Amino acid sequence: MVTQVHPAWIAVDWGSSNLRAWAMSDSGEALARADSDRGMLTLTAPEYEPTLLRAIGDWLPRSGRTPVLVCGMAGARQGWHEAAYLPVPARLDDLARGAASPPLDDPRLDVRLLPGLCQRRDADGRTFDVMRGEETQLAGLAAREPHFSGLACLPGTHAKWARLEAGAVTRFKTFLTGELYRLLVSQSVLRYSLGEDDLNAPDCREAFVDAVREIEAAPESFSARLFGLRAQDLLDDALPVGDARSARLAARLSGLAIGLELAGVRQALSMERSVTLIGTETLSDRYALALQALGHAVQRLDGSAAVLAGLGLARASLPT
């Protein structure tokens, strides 16, 4: 027997590669979830509404309009309908003021696309940067801790570091760490030496931590240490053989990439007692290990929980 879902509103996280949607109660409880592999990279603007309806159509009533709050790449210029970036500093409880409404055919839908955040170069050392989707996760942190001030890190393909002050993002920085790692593993000469690492294995964990410490102390040696991985594979008889060898070298590469990122936020880290990690368990585990190896405390927030809390905060601040 299929239970009929009657959401008060619908939360949607629409990324480059996939779509996640939740039927939400008025109290913020997720009643049901739907997933699709139709992300921005596979869609044209006219395809968004039919794709959304395939995911959530069973939740919609026969009459009346259901609010649908969407964060992520659906609001990008290349997405469904552009929701222009808000400049920092930006209050995270005020993202809804930049929400955009796409043209719709189905009268049951009331869709709002949340904006991303942007940063321009200025005399204080800020550089050009953008985020879209991560601001909603940061809003989830603000929803849980309205007066939060500190440093948050969102690990991912393009990792984000954001400074929050009393519920507002004042500056942020993006690192291409995840994408760089993938390119090195799949398209560089290192691909002949690398396998799948496992940081639960003591030798991989040790290799990862050693690499983080080495490169954070000497980030200028990054390129040379990368090629050193290939040379180590060819020459180091002390390394284990087979999969254990390639796993250890992959762990070292991961440590070098994340350690280089941490070197890039060294000054910000020096002024904070702890870092809040927002993301998946696997990536947060890796970043937590790297940060703790350098003596930094961490606290954590699940990425999906942050998205739902952030979309809930946006819904509460929508103009009536």
Image (tube, rainbow, N blue to C red):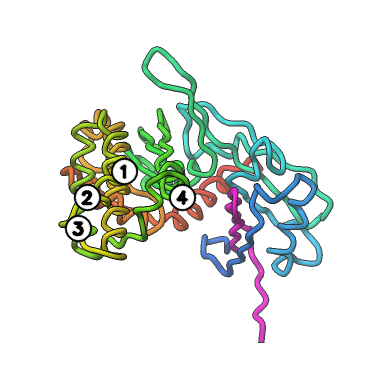
Name the secondary structure under disc 2: helix
Q: Which mark is residue 239?
A: 3
Q: Which amino acid does label 1 sit on?
A: Ile
Q: What residue type is labelled 3?
A: Leu
Does residue 9 lie above or below 178 as drawn?
below
Q: How far apart are marks 4 and 2 (CA)?
A: 22 Å
Does label 1 or label 2 sit earlier along the sequence?
2
How many other residues sit within 10 Å of disc 3, few (<14), some (14-19) or many (≥20)? some
Does label 4 or label 2 sit earlier along the sequence?
4
Q: Distance between the residues labelled 4 and 1?
A: 18 Å
On whether residue 13 falls in the magenta region, the answer is yes
Name the secondary structure under disc 4: helix
Residue 295 location (% of width, % of height):
16, 44
Residue beneath disc 1: 258
Magenta span covers which residues?
1-23
Does residue 65 lie above or below 217 as drawn?
below
Does residue 220 lie above or below 108 as drawn?
above
Horizontal relation, residue 298 to residue 47: left or right: left
Residue in the foreground of this view, choosing between 250 and 38: 250
Residue 137 location (% of width, % of height):
46, 47
Residue beneath disc 2: 235
Does label 3 or label 1 sit earlier along the sequence?
3
Q: Which residue is drawn at 28% across and 43% down?
A: 256
Q: Which residue is drawn at 58% across and 67% down?
A: 33
Residue beneath disc 4: 186
Q: Distance between the residues labelled 4 and 3?
A: 22 Å
Horizontal relation, residue 284 to residue 131: left or right: left
How many other residues sit within 10 Å of disc 4, few (<14), some (14-19) or many (≥20)? few
